[in-house]
Image: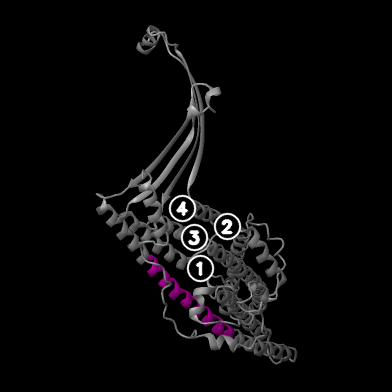
Amino acid sequence: MRNFPLATALFAASLLAGCAVGPDYHRPAMAAPAAFMGSAAVQSRSVPAMPGPEDTRWWSSFGDPMLTALVDRALGQNLDVAQAVARVSQARAGLHEATAALLPSGTVSASAAAQRLSEDTLQGRQLAAFGIGRNTEAYEADLGASWEIDLFGGLRRDREAALDAYQGARADVAAARLSVAAQVADSYITIRGLQERLAVADAQVGTQQRLVDTIGLQYRKGIAAELQLRQSEGALAQVRGTVPVLQVALDGALNALDVLMGEQPGTERARLSAPGAIPMAPAITAIGSPADLLQRRPDLIVAERKLAASNAQIGSAIAEYYPKISLSGLIGTAATGPASLLTGGATQAQGVFGLRWRLFDFGRVDAEIKAARGRNAEALAAYRLSALRASEDVEDAFSALVNREQQRRTLADGAKALTRAQQSSMAAYKGGVVSLIEVLDADTRLLETRDALAQARTETARAAVASFRSLGGGWTAATPSGGGA
């Protein structure tokens, strides 16, 4: 009957193996409308149907091979993505460590020691007085094992929190990839837009210079007033002043793209030096509903997994109210000489039943539980706020896309009308009906409209990128509350 306490502990462990203190996690219900306010307007856009957010390579739907190549390369080189991948490895290691804590652990130890005592010490003189040698040897080899029995589920809650953290880290990689893809696409579109605006600005400078030359000639002949000349010179200076501003913005966009590519600034400059067309905004299909964002956007999945982990940590804190029971044992041999290690008399064994209970520390345990519940409430508020902001992102992107596209169409019609006006003024000038000043004025108005059109086309494409990003870019993943790495 000497093994009764040990048998009792094992029996209790088998009964309570499925119990874990603390609240079980349930994903919070989120109130959301059936559809986005801008869904109908976005889906009614008269553009060719291209892959929508369900396509994980949404950037290819812009139909620009260079844009596609840049995004693909950036996803393999970007350092933010590399950091996120490294965090997955850390979270996986934490999950393995939490899983191992549930299992028995074993150790193997061996030692060999030799000692010679001094004759001038008290112990040495005593040994000499009894005729005992002062040289001693000791050899030992042991196999030990220990196991903390998780009666109340504290260790299981720790593993649950580690699993949630691991799943959140995996979703964070997808969030980083989505962010990098969107930033690269946005930078590329911005670069193309600025290149087109610089070309328009150069044409405006040429037109204004010709106007100044014409008025200057008339002024010297006494036909034009000095006021007209000075006004035209001021307009020329104003147009010239826009070129450095546009160049600074272009340089900044090129440098930002290089950093996104994980490269030194200036690496991609030669490749992108030749101006290219501003990509057209593609159709966006399979928009889904605000509720779909909870499964679609990786940043929301990260927030939800953090909430789940904080819930598990409440149970881990509550488990400190209860005793911790552990079993440990050792078997091995010990002798004063290597030849005696394998003899029966050298055998040694030990068994330990351990109990640890913070019986007089409940005030601190109470504080730890309150802190865990506070972190859980904070994580819940953060998750709900993230969901609201995600819907806001979608609505803002949809509004920008629809309205910028309307602006683009309006300006395109205006550019056509001004092109006809410019052609008419040139024909009238050749017929002697109007002066060159009227022709150059028509050129100026046309170029100003073309600059505004380039901006509208750029912003329309950027709004499409923002729409894909806000919808989650097509990345989906299941996040179960259990399972392994």
**Of callouts 3 and 2, the N-terminal one:** 2
Name the quadrant of the C terminus. Answer: bottom right
**Of callouts 1 and 2, the N-terminal one:** 2
Check disc 4 and report the residue beneath it: 102
Residue drawn at (37%, 64%) of the image: 376
The circle on residue 480 is 1
- Name the spot of residue 315 as percent of width and height, x first: 37, 60
- Can you name the residue that lies furthest to the right here? 430
Q: Quadrant of residue 200?
A: bottom right
> For the residue marked with disc 4, what is the amino acid?
Leu
Q: Nearer the viewer, mark 3 or mark 2?
A: 3
304 part of magenta stretch: no
Marks 4 and 2, how far apart at CA? 27 Å
Region rendered in magenta: 378-407
> For the residue marked with disc 2, what is the amino acid?
Val
> For the residue marked with disc 3, what is the amino acid?
Leu
Up-down relation of residue 135 to residue 235 (above or below):
above
* Left or right placement of residue 16 versus residue 289 in this view: left
